[in-house]
Structure formats: C-alpha cells, structure tokens
C-alpha cells in the first residue's frame, strides 16, 4: 500500500508542475495532465500528434467534481453512472453540452461545439490521483493518433515514452480488459446517442 501512495504523491507533484503523465486508467494506459493547465494539455496534443479540433476526455472521481464542470446533471446520467458501476460494466464516458462558463472559457479554443466528454472513474489509482490533485485530469489513450490504444505498458510506442515527463510505476504488467470506454451523449428529451461502444 505504501508503494501505491508513493506513486500517487510523485504523480501529483508532476501534475502540479504542469507536467504530463503516463498512467494506468480504468481502461487503457493514458496520457494525462491537470485539465486546467492549457500548456500541459497542448503538450499532450503534440505528443500524440493529434489534431487540436479533436477533444480529449476528462476524468473526475465524484459527482461533486462532475457538478463543478457541468451545470446540471440529468437524472438519466446519474442512473446510468450508478448502474454502470454497480454492475461492473465497461467504463462509460458521457458527452455533456451544458458545461459551466469557466470551463467553456478554458476549452473554447479547441472546443468549437462547447461540449465536454467526462468520465466518472471508480479506478482506485485514478480516483486517488484526482482527489489529491483536487482537479480533474485529462485522460487520452497513450498512443499516436491513428494507432490502436495500448492495453498494457509494453504496447506503448517508444516515441511517447521519450516525450512524457513521468511514467507511473504501477500496474505495468497488467493488461486492460477494455480497449477504451463507451461514449454516449445525452440529447434532447433525455435520449441517448451512442458515439462509441
């Protein structure tokens, strides 16, 4: 357990300095940073060779943190999140349209649609990391744009390993059950639009 918290502490130190992290998530290995540090976010786009018009997912660890980013969380979303985790289904990312003004201002350069994809994670490492940082973190798969996401540390491209600031030394020998999260969007009349299964 000491090792777990040592990695959390070390990771948070890097995140607070505006650095980029390679870390295990509730799906695949991910690239992450403090979601409100635009310099760090731009660095992740550069590492992945990703088009700036393509949004990245944010991770939060609680409904309270989610409500800091989204004006109103529909009952349908709360039900979906609760069912998803109580039945241990594939992690689910939800695209929100009613994001708060402060968040809109932060992401407006890249986010022309004023939407934000957010996943409430129950993964112990990610949840502790966000709680300790006290901010949401970016979560995007640790692959070059156009290539498959790495389900284990050994699958990560050397180009990415050479550009990140810190690679978390935790769960490196494990292989993820998932190759990403499901992504859905809540459209008008509380209907669900599936963007990715």
Image (cartoon, rainbow, N blue to C red):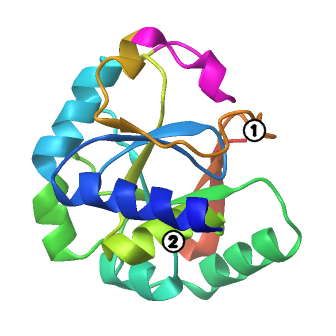
The crowding category of the residue bearing disc 1, from other C-alpha atoms within 10 Å (few below 14, some 14 to 19, many at least 20), is some
Q: Give the spatial CA distance, label 1 vs label 2.
A: 19 Å
Task: Judge the density around disc 2: few (<14), some (14-19), many (≥20) Cα neighbours within 10 Å.
Answer: some
Which percent across, then down, holds residue 9? 39, 64
Residue at 47% from the left image edge and 62% from the top image edge: 6
Asked if residue 64 lies in the magenta stretch, the reply is no
Looking at this view, name the residue that lies furthest to the right. 87
Looking at the image, is mark 1 or mark 2 earlier in the sequence?
2
Determine whether, in the image, residue 82 is placed left or right of residue 93. right
**Count of all numbered marks drawn on residues in the image:** 2
**What residue sits right under mark 1 in the picture?**
176
Magenta stretch in the rendered image:
146-158
Q: Tag 2, which secondary structure?
A: helix
Position above or below: 40 against 9: above
Q: Residue at x 51, y 74 (%)?
A: 61
Asked if the residue at tag 2 contacts the one at tag 1, i.e. Cβ–Cβ closer than 8 Å, the answer is no
Q: Nearer the viewer, residue 53 or 164?
A: 164
Q: Is residue 181 left or right of residue 45?
A: right
Q: Name the residue rendered at 13%, 49% in the picture.
A: 38
**Residue 132: mark:** none
What residue would you read off at disc 2? 128
Question: Is 156 placed above or below 8 here?
Answer: above
Mark 1: secondary structure: loop
Q: Is residue 150 magenta-colored?
A: yes
Nearer to the camera, 158 or 138: 158
Q: Is residue 98 visible?
A: no
Is residue 39 among the parts visible in the rendering?
yes
x and y percent of residue 139 in the render?
Answer: 44, 47
Residue 176 against residue 118 in the figure, above or below: above
Quadrant in which the C terminus appears? top right
Residue 79's place in the image compared with 166, above or below, is below
């Amino acid at each position: 357990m000491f090792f777990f918290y040592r990695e959390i502490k070390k990771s948070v130190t890097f995140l607070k300095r505006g650095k980029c992290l390679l870390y295990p998530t509730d799906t695949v290995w991910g690239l992450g940073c403090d979601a409100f540090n635009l310099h760090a976010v731009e660095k992740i786009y550069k590492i992945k060779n990703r088009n700036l018009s393509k949004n990245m997912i944010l991770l939060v660890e609680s409904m309270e943190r989610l409500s800091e980013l989204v004006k109103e969380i529909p009952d349908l979303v709360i039900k979906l999140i609760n069912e998803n985790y109580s039945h241990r289904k594939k992690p689910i990312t939800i695209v929100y349209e009613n994001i708060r003004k402060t968040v809109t201002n932060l992401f407006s350069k890249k986010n022309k649609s004023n939407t934000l994809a957010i996943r409430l994670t129950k993964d112990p490492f990610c949840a502790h990391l966000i709680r300790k940082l006290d901010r949401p973190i970016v979560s995007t798969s640790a692959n070059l744009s156009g290539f498959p996401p790495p389900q284990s540390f050994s699958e990560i491209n050397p180009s990415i390993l050479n550009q990140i600031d810190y690679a978390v030394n935790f769960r490196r020998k494990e292989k993820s059950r998932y190759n990403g999260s499901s992504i859905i969007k809540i459209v008008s009349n509380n209907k669900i639009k599936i963007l990715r299964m």
